Image (cartoon, rainbow, N blue to C red):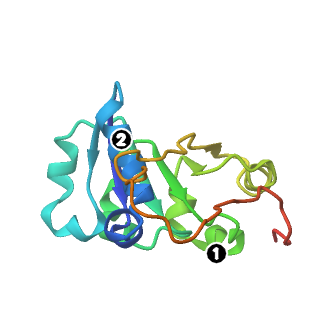
Amino acid sequence: MNILFIPENCHYHVWPGKTYNDILVNYQKYSKNNINIIYTNEYHNYDETKIKNMNLDLIVFFDTDTLRYAKNFDYVFNMNIPIFACSLDLFHIKLCMKCKYIEQCTGILTFSRSTKVLNKYRECFPDKIIDYFDARYVNTDRFKNYKLKKKYDILLYGSRAWSYHFI
């Protein structure tokens, strides 16, 4: 399968934490599929002909909530290729519902398996495929014990609790 990832450049490529870039590059490296990555700032290097010549089976846009940079690739929405929107902040459902590019997508993916988010999107977009990108990943080349002298103990933790209203 030929897949094109189009991630938003700032958050998915140059962001200092590199977490999401690591996920995409790792998936590209180890996938059984042929994955191409075009960051949104590279749009001027591509046109409809170059994208068609990739013989794509799937396109996935990665952004923060709405597909802010899809306008630079708007021709792909006329190529009869399944297109998915994968966003970090899908809890901004009202913004996403107004995004003309998300409206044209085949489906929506989240980066986490939040049942409330998935169910709400299935309710709001009954004709779309709604699923999650099962890709939590830690780059052990970047996050490892560097054997440095420790001055402070640091605890990193998170919560899966849903403590605010969704819509």
Quick check: 54 above or below 143?
above
In the rendered view, does 83 fall on the left or right side of 4?
Answer: right
Mark 2 element type: helix
- How many other residues sit within 10 Å of disc 2, few (<14), some (14-19) or many (≥20)? some
Residue 99 image-quadrant placement = bottom right
In the rendered view, does 70 fall on the left or right side of 38?
Answer: right
- How many other residues sit within 10 Å of disc 1, few (<14), some (14-19) or many (≥20)? few
Q: Earlier in the sequence, mark 1 or mark 2?
A: 2
Which part of the image, by quadrant, shows the N terminus?
Answer: top left
Quick check: 67 above or below 2?
below
Q: Nearer the viewer, residue 119 or 81?
A: 119
In the image, residue 108 lies at what x, y percent?
A: 59, 51
Residue at (36% x, 30% y) in the render: 31
In the image, residue 35 lies at what x, y percent?
A: 30, 38
Quick check: 167 above or below 119?
below
- Residue 163 seen by the camera: yes
Q: Which residue type does callout 2 highlight?
A: Asn
Mark 1 element type: helix
Residue that mark 2 sits on:
26
Which part of the image, by quadrant, shows the C terminus?
Answer: bottom right
Rounded to the nearest angstrom, the CA distance separating label 1 from label 2 is 30 Å
Q: Which residue type does callout 1 highlight?
A: Leu
In contact (CB < 8 Å): disc 1 and disc 2:
no
Q: Count all numbered tags in the image, as a single digit.
A: 2
Dot label at residue 95: 1
- Residue 34 seen by the camera: no
Q: Nearer the viewer, residue 167 or 19?
A: 19
In the image, residue 71 lies at what x, y percent?
A: 36, 71
Residue 77 image-quadrant placement = bottom left
